[in-house]
Image: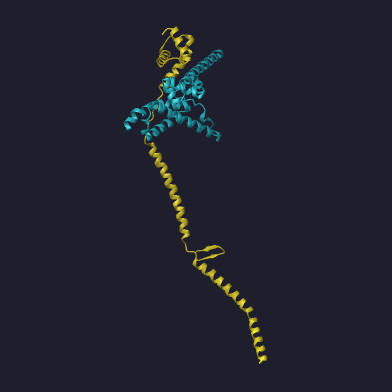
């Protein structure tokens, strides 16, 4: 390719007006020509760069079923979460299924003996209060006696 | 679409996909991941591919969208992290860019505005026609021409500047 032609083509290229074929010509010229005009020598590296970039390849195998593995991975994660949740719910419900024998100050008592002890204590307190309560009723007996004496006097 | 058809029509674009992702993300590893991801996604939605006239342009458009999403995501991540400052910076790959000039050219191209970089890559590296570039980027033909000439002119100008600076320095 003569100087005039290549100069014209490079100018056209930098204006963005070259066709794909002309661009291929330029790439070929700057990669293969031995006598590049000194004025255009700086473009040699540029078109070499273009050619190198065009030859870059993806060398790893394309795996199409990887998403299945990803899905499996996600599913196993979900399964683990479900298992943990189920365990928590199960252990909680198990504790809820225990027999509550009594409530002391709002707290449930699950042990029978403890409940019996608290119950006895509570009953003892009730009977104690009941006794002190009946003691006060003794005044009524005095009233009864007075009433009987009055009745006798009337007779 | 059968696996054989998918391999022939879609997976055969893997080099183009990889190069495009590599240019957009400026990182080999991320580009490999995106290449793998894009084919997995396309395989899952393989029945939709036949709805597109130009599957090649559709695949490249998907690459562009996925990469730009990743860049956006990286930027957000970077905003909230002080440890990953280097992730979006230009990476120099020693295995193939041993040539000082190619590193220089790569840096010039990497510093172009994103739109110009995309259009220049699709035209100069992949050899797409303007109407195909329009389909991939969504830009008008006129915009494509303007951005392409600006990108090329900018590369030329920067290249000359660097070379002249190098010569005057010596």
Chain A palette colour: yellow
Choose between B127 and B156: the one closer to the eye: B127
Q: Is B125 displayed left or right of A137 in the figure?
A: left
Choose between B53 and A88: the one closer to the eye: B53
Q: Is residue B113 above or below residue A74?
A: above
Q: Is residue B122 above or below residue A126?
A: above
Choose between A36 and A103: the one closer to the eye: A103
Image spot of residue A128 (x, y percent): 59, 75
Residue name at image x 67 percent, y 88 percent: A150
Q: Is residue A116 visible?
A: yes
What sort of colour scheme is used for the picture? by chain
Q: Residue furthest front?
A: A154
Chain letter for the cyan colouring in the rendering: B
Q: Is residue A6 above or below residue B83?
A: above
Image spot of residue A108 (x, y percent): 52, 63
Number of disc labels: 0
Residue name at image x 53 percent, y 34 percent: B76
Q: Quadrant of the C terminus of chain B?
A: top right
Choose between A101 and B98: the one closer to the eye: A101
Image spot of residue A31 (x, y percent): 42, 14
Q: Is B158 displayed left or right of A132 in the figure?
A: left
Q: Is residue A63 visible?
A: no
């Amino acid at each position: 390719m003569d100087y005039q032609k290549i100069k014209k083509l490079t100018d056209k290229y930098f204006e963005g007006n070259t066709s794909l074929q002309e661009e291929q010509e330029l790439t070929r010229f700057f990669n293969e020509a031995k006598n590049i005009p000194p004025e255009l020598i700086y473009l040699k590296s540029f078109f070499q760069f273009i050619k190198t970039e065009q030859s870059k390849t993806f060398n790893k195998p394309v795996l199409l079923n990887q998403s299945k593995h990803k899905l499996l991975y996600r599913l196993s994660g979900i399964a683990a979460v479900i298992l943990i949740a189920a365990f928590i719910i199960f252990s909680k419900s198990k504790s809820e299924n225990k027999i509550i024998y009594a409530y002391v100050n709002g707290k449930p008592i699950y042990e029978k003996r403890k409940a019996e002890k608290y119950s006895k204590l509570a009953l003892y307190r009730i009977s104690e209060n009941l006794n002190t309560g009946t003691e006060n009723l003794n005044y009524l007996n005095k009233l009864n006696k007075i009433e009987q004496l009055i009745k006798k006097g009337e007779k | 679409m059968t696996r054989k058809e998918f391999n022939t029509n879609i997976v055969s674009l893997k080099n183009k996909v990889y190069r495009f992702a590599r240019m957009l993300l400026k990182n080999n590893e991320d580009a490999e991941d995106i290449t793998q991801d894009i084919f997995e996604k396309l395989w899952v939605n393989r029945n939709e591919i036949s709805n597109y006239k130009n599957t090649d342009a559709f695949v490249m458009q998907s690459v562009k969208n996925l990469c730009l999403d990743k860049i956006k995501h990286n930027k957000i991540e970077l905003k909230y992290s002080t440890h990953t400052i280097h992730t979006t910076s230009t990476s120099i790959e020693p295995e193939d860019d041993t040539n000082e000039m190619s590193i220089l050219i790569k840096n010039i191209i990497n510093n172009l505005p994103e739109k110009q970089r995309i259009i220049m890559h699709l035209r100069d590296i992949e050899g797409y026609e303007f109407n195909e570039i329009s389909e991939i980027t969504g830009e008008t033909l006129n915009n494509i021409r303007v951005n392409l000439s600006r990108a090329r002119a900018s590369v030329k100008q920067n290249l000359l500047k660097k070379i002249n600076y190098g010569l005057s320095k010596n």
